[in-house]
Amino acid sequence: MNQFSPLWLVDDEPDSHLIMGLALRSANPAIVPTFLKDGDEFLHSLRQTPRLPKVVLLDLYMRRLDGFRVLRRLRNQSTYQDIPVVILTASHDERDREKAMLLGATDYRIKPVSLETTKGLLNWVTTRWLQQ
């Protein structure tokens, strides 16, 4: 990671990276997100970075280290407790939402199904956490 990025997306689906990248370039071209392929890569990158992200979009169901375990580890370390983590998942299961919020998620959002709704979500994220 050469350049600081205030927005990190953790998702094991390459299509999610592509769609989010396209939507973000359209919604706010000044922000270049950091894409991480799973929870392990995210936690490793977090330990290595000199500047913490301002917000993390985290998928729940990933192959290696899922979002629930990432949240648990993140919230158990004082250095990372205050990083906003928005769960971005395909799961509509209310139990997943409740568990994520109990583990310390800042918000829980269902993955948008279109580029336009993805832009709307990213506008909300950038307005709430990245404009200061």
Image (cartoon, rainbow, N blue to C red):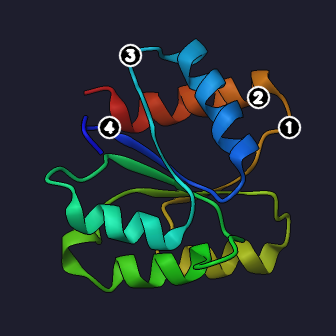
Comparing labels 4 and 1, the label whose residue is closer to the camera: 4
- Which residue in the structure is indicated by mark 4? 5
Percent position (x, y) of residue 35?
Answer: 50, 46
Which quadrant is the C terminus positioned in? top left
> Would you say the residues marked 1 and 3 are in contact, meaning their CB atoms lie under 8 Å apart?
no
Q: Earlier in the sequence, mark 4 or mark 1?
A: 4
Look at the numbered disc 2 and give the secondary structure of its residue. Answer: helix
Look at the numbered disc 1 and give the secondary structure of its residue. Answer: loop
- Which residue in the structure is indicated by mark 1? 113
> Would you say the residues marked 4 and 1 are in contact, meaning their CB atoms lie under 8 Å apart?
no
Q: Residue furthest left?
A: 50
Q: Amino acid at mark 4?
A: Ser
Query: Against 55, is 67 above or below?
Result: below
Percent position (x, y) of residue 61?
Answer: 72, 71
Look at the numbered disc 3 and give the secondary structure of its residue. Answer: loop
> Would you say the residues marked 2 and 3 are in contact, meaning their CB atoms lie under 8 Å apart?
no
The image quadrant of residue 74 is bottom left
